[in-house]
Image (cartoon, rainbow, N blue to C red):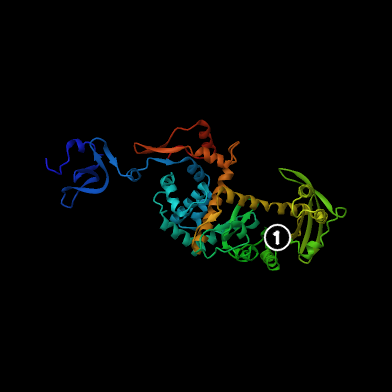
């Protein structure tokens, strides 16, 4: 036997489809395959080295050997449920984007909806280890491909704006608009600036503006603006993105300005906005309970009495509402701080502010609504606050590292799509008794699929989980 021959007992230890080379007395294992050349002769093709063999140990793979082999178990349950219950979003994407782009946007957004905010470098990892590779095979989700996607979404916005216009046109037309501050840890992002929350964040910020359908409970528009730009200025560009007619804008007092009031009036639109305390029409509001009228107001959580007065001006009216229960609660809270000696709480302050506890001063051009309807519409604005609570704590959009203006705008569209996916899923999970959306996803996450004899099939699961899958119209069989 030659000095570089491989003993039979060593060859017997190699994996199937490989060959062994003796190099300086060490046995290295290489990938090996046979093929026929153009003359029909069989030849052997040697691939990369995947490990070594020691007679006393056997085959020893390289560190990355297993990562290069076929994946035979995939994440299934939570991906399948969210996919089966967000078909309307995918359908709308395909109506505005070509099929390949629609699938790419949808899968990226779905991963964000399921995993929370996800960095570009991690998206492909989730895709590769999930059933999405079977449902949407061949997607390009590497870092460079996603950078191109985000850049295109931010730079070439015709289809993005048409998509958002479609959402606006099919909405209830009762829209809350508000901003959300996101910290930015990138020094190269044109949008990152010191804003009003710099003392809290201790870093630059970017400002996300979203429009939210308060009747259907879903977002409609999304755009990111400079961190140092006030929302009452950003909203002027925001509302110019799409055509809005016969809409009701329900906004916070931070958007109050004469220019914005004029903007809200355009196109047959309506508005409902709190009046800042510095305005004269706020200071002259009638707050004497003896002169105010009343109506009962009830929600699922409480019932209370609302006092109100109304003054009409040229083209608009101003309501003063006082929630009696809220007024008592605020006064009680003030007294507690007064007794504790909290700085800034004084008896003089109590007397000065008592008439303003529980009070809302609202300006509107709605003329055909009752005072109770106007108050109820404004209270719906809190739905966007609840949405932003999910956005911050559930989806974890708190700090971004994007360094490019266009990619940041592309990400804002991904945020919108992921929120629409979550919205559609949340509607479906209401059918599951005694479980929240997150609890449904956690239970579903236990279901994996395995490849056995070339066939993908889920592992056995509990009857309760199988019932949940049926309720959510999600198959446990892989087609």
In terms of depth relative to the viewer, which is nearer, 344 or 137?
A: 344
Q: Nearer the viewer, residue 6 or 213?
A: 6
Establish if 151 lies above or below 24: below
Q: Residue at x 44, y 38 (%)?
A: 448
Q: Is residue 16 visible?
A: no
Extreme-bottom residue of the structure: 259
Residue reaching furthest to the left: 1
Q: State whether residue 74 appears in this view.
A: yes
Residue 273 image offset from top left, x and y in percent: 71, 59
| 346 displayed left or right of 436 | right
Identify the residue at image location x=84%, y=53%.
293
In the depicted view, which residue is nearer to us: 268 or 332? 332
Q: Is residue 254 left or right of residue 420?
A: right
Residue bearing mark 1: 253
Q: Image quadrant of residue 236?
A: bottom right
Place residue 287 in its image quadrant. bottom right
Q: Secondary structure at mark 1?
A: helix
Q: x, y percentage for residue 107?
A: 47, 50
């Amino acid at each position: 036997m030659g000095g570089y021959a491989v003993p039979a007992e060593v060859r017997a230890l190699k994996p199937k489809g490989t060959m062994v080379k003796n190099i300086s007395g060490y046995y290295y294992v290489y990938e090996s395959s046979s093929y026929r050349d153009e003359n029909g002769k069989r030849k052997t093709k040697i691939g990369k080295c995947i490990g070594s063999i020691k007679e006393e140990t056997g085959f020893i793979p390289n560190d990355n050997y297993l990562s290069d082999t076929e994946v035979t178990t995939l994440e299934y349950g939570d991906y399948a449920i969210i996919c089966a219950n967000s078909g309307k979003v995918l359908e709308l994407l395909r109506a505005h984007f070509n099929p390949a782009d629609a699938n790419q946007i949808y899968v990226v957004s779905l991963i964000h909806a399921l995993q929370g905010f996800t960095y570009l470098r991690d998206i492909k990892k989730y895709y590769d280890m999930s059933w999405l590779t079977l449902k949407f095979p061949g997607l390009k989700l590497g870092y460079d491909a996603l950078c191109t996607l985000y850049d295109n979404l931010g730079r070439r916005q015709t289809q993005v704006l048409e998509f958002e216009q479609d959402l606006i046109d099919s909405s209830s037309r009762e829209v809350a608009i508000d901003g959300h501050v996101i910290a930015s840890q990138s020094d190269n992002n044109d949008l990152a600036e010191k804003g009003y929350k710099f003392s809290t964040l201790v870093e630059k910020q970017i400002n996300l503006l979203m429009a939210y359908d308060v009747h259907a409970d879903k977002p409609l528009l999304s755009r990111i603006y400079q961190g140092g730009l006030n929302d009452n200025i950003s909203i002027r560009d925001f509302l110019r993105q799409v055509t809005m007619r016969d809409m009701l804008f329900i906004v916070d007092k931070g958007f109050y300005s004469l220019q914005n009031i004029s903007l809200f009036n355009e196109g047959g639109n309506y508005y409902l906005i709190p009046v800042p305390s510095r305005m004269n029409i706020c200071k002259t509001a009638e707050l004497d309970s003896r002169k105010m009228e009343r109506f009962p107001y009830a929600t699922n959580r409480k019932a209370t009495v609302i006092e109100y007065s109304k003054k009409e001006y040229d083209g608009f009216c101003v309501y003063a509402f006082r929630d009696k229960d809220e007024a008592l609660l605020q006064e009680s809270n003030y007294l507690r701080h007064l007794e504790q000696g909290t700085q800034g709480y004084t008896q003089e302050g109590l007397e000065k502010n008592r008439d303003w506890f529980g009070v809302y001063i609202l300006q509107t051009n709605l003329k055909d609504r009752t005072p109770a309807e106007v108050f109820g519409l404004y209270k719906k604005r809190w739905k966007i606050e609840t949405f932003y609570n999910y956005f911050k704590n559930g989806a974890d959009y708190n700090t971004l590292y994007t360094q490019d203006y266009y990619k940041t705008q592309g990400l804002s569209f991904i945020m919108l799509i992921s929120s629409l996916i979550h919205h559609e899923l949340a509607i479906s999970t209401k059918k599951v008794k005694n479980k929240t959306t997150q609890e449904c996803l956690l239970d579903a996450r236990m279901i994996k699929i395995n490849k056995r004899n070339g066939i993908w099939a889920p592992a056995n699961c509990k009857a309760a989980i199988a019932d949940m899958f049926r309720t959510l119209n999600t198959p446990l069989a892989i087609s």
